[in-house]
Image (cartoon, helix red, strand yellow):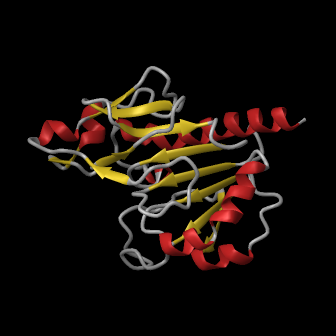
Amino acid sequence: MREQLTLLKLDPGHAFGVNGRMQKDKGNEAKVIEQYDFAEENLEHVDVLIVPNFIDQEFLYSQREKIARFLAEKKMVVYCGHLFREWLPGCGPFMPQLIRNYQDYEVFPTENSSIFQGVTTEDMTFKKGVAGFFARGYHHAPKNAEILLTFANGKPVTYVDRTTTNGTILVHAGRDLLGYSDENKTTDRIRPQFLAWLEAEVRSLKEKSE
């Protein structure tokens, strides 16, 4: 039986037009709200806040205390994108990967990573023969963070932070992890494995709250 999750996803709205976004969330697992409605949204029954790329980070900076309170209540924030404002606890600014040739875009799952289990480096790195669509940079992970995905030089593309706050923060320096589906590649595994990981993480957080 699947864990009952309450996911709240912020919609930037403007990115590539309403009907022409580069990634579409195929499921209905998350309640989606317009990003600026977050200021008035009641988070009492929300387990996971999902913040995708192209979000208005100046606005989120104004909401940083609300996000910090949410995490203090042993909840979870997932951010997929390039951080440039300090609205997310423990996360440093996005750093572009140093690129000398296409191999510098290659990403590698770590042994800890159930989200990327069975997903090949080739399928993540290349799209229609072009490298760099999956990730083009990284964030400096906090001390004791769990690293899930790296470049060959060890820079963390995806990490989990369970120590900066009472909650859990997942940072992915790329596009929305819920958007990977229907590509007929091993990347189709990311979405269901990510949802399963969220379920397990929320269950663990709730057990700690009891």
Q: Nearer the viewer, residue 26 or 43?
A: 43
Residue at horizontal 50%, vertical 34%? 115
The residue under the point 55% across, 40% down is: 194
Q: Which one is in front, 25 or 75?
A: 75
Taking depth in this image into account, of 142 and 198 the one nearest to the observer is 142
Front-most of 183 and 163? 163
The residue that appears at 39% across and 79% down in the rendered structure is: 17
Query: Residue 135 placed where, x, y %?
Result: 31, 48
Placement of 32 over or under 130, stated as above or below: below
Q: Position of residue 93 (x, y in %)?
A: 40, 54
Q: Tell me if residue 56 can be seen.
A: no
* Residue 141 image position (x, y, % from top left): 46, 39
With 143 as the anchor, is 84 left or right in this view?
Answer: left
Q: Name the residue at the top extreme.
A: 111
Q: Can you say which quadrant of the picture contains the N terminus?
A: top right
Q: Is residue 22 above or below residue 35?
A: above
For residue 160, what is the image quadrant? top right
